[in-house]
Image (tube, rainbow, N blue to C red):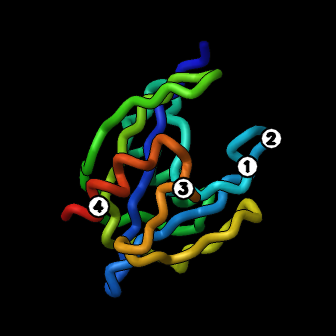
Amino acid sequence: MIRLHVAAGILRNEAGQVLITERLCDGPYNGLWEFPGGKIRTGESPDDALRRELNEELGVDAITVAPFMNLSHTYPDRSVELEFFLVDEWRGEPSGLDGQRIRWVPVAELDIAELLPADGPIVIALQER
């Protein structure tokens, strides 16, 4: 089974919304939404990986990155260790540099059904805050 270590960011704007991005891939999760981020490279810290991924995927430079929650999720073909970070300050205007759609959603309106299965506990934790 494939094992992945991933860093993901919860970008929050002044209106209390969070940024989610459309997942573009070959597979069963194409078209679902997720919190932006990606794989942590060998020798890279999780927060450095997140900063790199946010820059590559969205064109933003994260200024503040604070740990939020770690979790594990097993899909049929892979096991994923996820490290989530709150990102409240960044430079640049987020845009889908890989062709993915992005959208700002009020926390109360995040719908677990349209997000990757691994993101469900994050939505619950955000809505309980």
Amino acid of disc 2: Asp
Q: Which label's residue is closer to the chain start, 2 or 3?
A: 2
Q: Of callouts 4 and 2, which one flags the residue occurring earlier in the amino acid sequence?
A: 2
Q: Amino acid at mark 3?
A: Ala
Quarter of the image that includes the N terminus: top right
The residue that mark 2 highlights is 26
Tell me which amino acid carries mark 4.
Leu
Q: Which of these two is toward me, 25 or 32?
A: 32
C-alpha gap between disc 1 and disc 3: 13 Å
In this view, which residue lies farthest toward the top? 1
Q: Which mark is residue 30?
A: 1
| Between discs 1 and 3, the one toward the N terminus | 1
Looking at the image, residue 14 lies above or below residue 115: below
Asked whether 84 or 55 is in front, the reply is 84
Residue tagged 3? 113
**Image point (39%, 30%), residue name:** 72
Residue at 47% x, 76% y is 105
Cβ atoms under marks 2 and 1 closer than 8 Å? yes
Residues at circles 2 and 3 in contact by the CB criterion of under 8 Å: no
Task: Find residue 44 and report its horizontal and vertical position in percent.
Answer: 44, 33
Residue at 31% in and 59% down: 86
Q: Residue at x 50, y 77 (%)?
A: 104
- Label 2 crowding class (10 Å Cα cut-off): few <14, some 14-19, many 20+? few
Q: Position of residue 101 (x, y in %)?
A: 68, 69
**In this rendering, the label closer to the viewer, 3 or 4:** 3
**Quarter of image, res 64:** bottom left
Using the numbered discs, state the Cα–Cα distance from disc 4 to disc 2 in whole angstroms.
Answer: 29 Å
* Residue for badge 4: 126
